[in-house]
């Protein structure tokens, strides 16, 4: 659902305030309200964030796993800009700390996140599979997961020359992540939001 009639620049988006707690993505200069998602969506996001945090602690990488607080500026074919907010982002701690005194949006001129995850909802399905996939690939984000509780599958995407190679897994299939090679979870565990 688009809520603005006037197109906004990225700078105007950073400082937009409408007096509500509504969160927005900026898509080609237009504010798009982010839906709350279902309870299952929330359980999956929380579960995966915890699993990423545990995996990061085990590998002792200086990374963060954060959900829904980091924006990623996307390229746009039009004059207006786009900024997405992935459900989960994995990025170096130093990169997040560098944004300490500015909006937490990784611009197209900065190093992209290591991995992003989108959990599909009925209202986001098209964007998650099409728009965001193209945008995240163009940004050279190494790994993109599309977790789809509606279709009971996960699409794992790995970037190659700004495009994603992908494969779908289901049920008892295990996650095969280049970023987290020791991740020991099945699709069913992730979609259930618990081990």
Image (cartoon, rainbow, N blue to C red):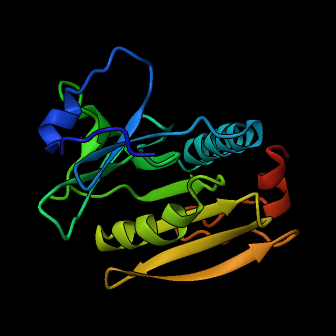
Whole-percent x, y for residue 111 in the image: 24, 57
What's the residue at 28%, 35% (across, down)? 104
- Residue 61 appears in view: no
Whole-percent x, y for residue 147 in the image: 66, 60
What's the residue at 27%, 42% (across, down)? 105
Whole-percent x, y for residue 142 in the image: 41, 69
Side of 46 relative to 97 (left or right): right
Residue lying farthest to the front in this orientation: 5
What's the residue at 15%, 34% (across, down)? 12
Q: Please say if 64 is above or below 168.
A: above
Side of 6 relative to 130 (left or right): left
What's the residue at 60%, 34% (across, down)? 36
Residue lying farthest to the top in this orientation: 19
Side of 159 relative to 128 (left or right): left
Q: How many marks?
A: 0
Residue toward you, 39 or 176: 39
Side of 33 relative to 112 (left or right): right
- Residue 30 appears in view: yes
Q: Residue 188's quadrant in the figure? A: bottom right
Q: Please say if 167 is above or below 75.
A: below
Whole-percent x, y for residue 55 in the image: 62, 48
């Amino acid at each position: 659902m688009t809520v603005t009639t006037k197109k906004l620049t990225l700078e105007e988006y950073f400082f937009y305030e409408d007096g509500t707690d509504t969160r927005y993505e900026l898509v080609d200069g237009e504010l798009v309200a982010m839906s709350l998602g279902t309870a299952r969506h929330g359980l999956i996001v929380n579960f995966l964030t915890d699993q990423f945090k545990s995996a990061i602690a085990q590998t002792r990488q200086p990374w963060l796993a954060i959900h829904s607080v980091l924006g990623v500026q996307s390229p746009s074919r039009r004059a207006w800009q786009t900024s997405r907010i992935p459900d989960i982002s994995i990025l170096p701690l130093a990169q997040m700390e560098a944004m300490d005194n500015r909006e937490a949006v990784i611009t197209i001129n900065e190093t992209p996140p290591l991995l992003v995850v989108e959990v599909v909802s009925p209202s986001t399905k098209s964007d998650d599979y099409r728009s965001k996939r193209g945008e995240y690939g163009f940004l050279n984000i190494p790994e993109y997961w599309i977790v789809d509780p509606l279709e009971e599958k996960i699409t794992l995407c790995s970037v190659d020359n700004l495009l994603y190679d992908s494969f779908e897994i289901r049920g008892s299939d295990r996650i095969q992540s280049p970023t987290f090679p020791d991740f020991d979870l099945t699709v069913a565990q992730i979609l259930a939001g618990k081990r």
